[in-house]
């Protein structure tokens, strides 16, 4: 492998790390947004803004997809709708310690589904890296939250967040063949668009039941929060997440998800003046070591269609 090819491959492998960092900011933004916008409606607005941004880029590039693959995008759209609905409802129904702890389940489900659905094998070095990243994340969370809070909360919210972890793992794994055939940009765009009808129906039902006031949704702060969730956490982050799948396996990409609670804790400390425990730096270092181990183990990747990725990504 040439030096330029190695840099490019490592860059694609690290794209999901940036995606997870962006998602870490959702913790702070969601805390500000849920008071003004109910969760299902906020989820719909987030995906609608993100899908519009992605589609504008796809249209400008003249990208098209085969009609025979519409069903694949519909399946991915279903995973998206399920992820957003359960994630936002679960976040509203649980406390911060439960939500952060359950985040750790997403890489586990992704690795398991990748092995089951795609027949991916997990190398020893990758398994060690994932274990290190998981332990580091748990150390960070243990220092940030009171462990006794984990047992306090809504069981339905916990179940919703577990289902959200499974759904995002499904979106990752079932997206692999679509990403490899087209590109990260195309897969993220059309899966987002395919999720909008279901999310729109859920939002309409929520609005009819709750009858939330409209004025808080139109404040500058709320609009900026929706813009961050749409352009950053959806359009940019979903593209970056799928970008990693162009080069490496779903199991390898999953390990980068562990960075999300670390970034969320750091931003919470800076912007919300929340405490971070003395083990924050230790846990962060262990997590970083795990992610580095996975990224170097996955450098050989699973191939992918580099030409497809470069033409549209």
Image: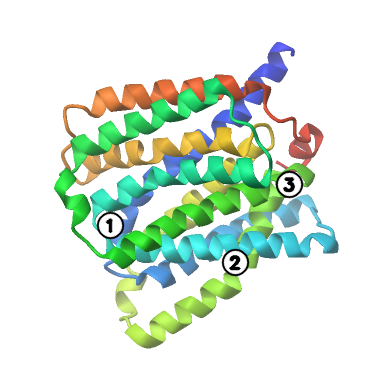
Question: Residue 72 in the image: x percent, y percent?
Answer: 73, 59
Question: Residue 259 in the image: x percent, y percent?
Answer: 40, 35
| Residue wearing tag 1 | 31
Mark 3 vs 1: CB contact within 8 A: no
Gap in angstroms between the C-alphas marked 1 and 2 = 24 Å
**Residue 32 horizontal side relative to residue 4, left or right:** left
Q: Is residue 42 above or below residue 15?
A: below
**Residue 114 horizontal side relative to residue 291, left or right:** right
Gap in angstroms between the C-alphas marked 3 and 1 = 35 Å
How many numbered discs, if any?
3
**Could you tell me which residue is drawn at 45 percent across and 59 percent down?**
163
Observer-nearest of 58 and 185: 185
Observer-nearest of 148 and 76: 148
Gap in angstroms between the C-alphas marked 2 and 3 = 19 Å
| Residue wearing tag 2 | 195
Figure quadrant of residue 8: top right
**Could you tell me which residue is drawn at 17 percent across and 51 percent down?**
149
**Residue 208 horizontal side relative to residue 53, left or right:** left
Observer-nearest of 190 and 89: 89
Assign the N terminus to one quadrant of the image: top right
Assign the C terminus to one quadrant of the image: top right
Crowd band around label 2 with a 10 angstrom C-alpha radius: few (<14), some (14–19), many (20+): many
Q: Which mark is residue 177?
A: 3
Crowd band around label 1 with a 10 angstrom C-alpha radius: few (<14), some (14–19), many (20+): some
Q: Is residue 263 above or below residue 84?
A: above
Please say whether residue 15 is visible from this viewpoint.
yes
Q: Nearer the viewer, mark 3 or mark 1?
A: 3
């Amino acid at each position: 492998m040439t030096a330029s090819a190695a840099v490019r491959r490592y860059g694609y492998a690290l794209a999901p790390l940036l995606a997870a960092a962006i998602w870490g900011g959702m913790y702070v933004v969601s805390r500000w947004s849920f008071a003004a916008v109910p969760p299902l409606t906020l989820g719909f607005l987030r995906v609608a803004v993100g899908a519009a941004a992605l589609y504008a880029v796809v249209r400008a590039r003249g990208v098209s997809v085969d009609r025979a693959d519409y069903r694949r995008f519909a399946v991915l759209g279903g995973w998206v709708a399920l992820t957003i609905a359960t994630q936002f409802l679960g976040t509203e129904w649980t406390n911060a310690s439960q939500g952060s702890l359950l985040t750790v389940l997403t890489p586990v489900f992704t690795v398991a589904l990748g092995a089951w659905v795609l027949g991916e094998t997990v190398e020893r070095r990758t398994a060690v890296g994932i274990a290190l990243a998981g332990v580091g994340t748990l150390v960070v969370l243990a220092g940030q939250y009171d462990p006794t809070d984990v047992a306090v909360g809504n069981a339905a919210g916990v179940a919703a967040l577990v289902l959200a972890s499974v759904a995002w793992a499904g979106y990752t794994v079932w997206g692999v063949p679509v990403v490899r055939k087209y590109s990260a940009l195309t897969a993220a765009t059309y899966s987002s668009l395919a999720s909008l009808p279901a999310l729109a129906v859920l939002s309409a039902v929520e609005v009819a039941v709750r009858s939330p006031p409209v004025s808080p949704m139109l404040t500058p702060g709320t609009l900026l929060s929706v813009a961050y969730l749409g352009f950053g956490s959806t359009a940019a982050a979903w593209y970056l997440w799928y970008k990693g799948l162009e080069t490496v396996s779903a199991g390898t990409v999953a390990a980068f998800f562990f960075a999300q609670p670390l970034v969320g804790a750091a931003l919470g400390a800076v912007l919300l003046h929340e405490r971070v425990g003395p083990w924050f730096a230790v846990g962060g270092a262990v997590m970083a070591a795990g992610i580095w181990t996975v990224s170097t183990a996955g450098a050989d990747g699973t191939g992918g269609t580099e030409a497809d990725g470069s033409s549209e990504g």
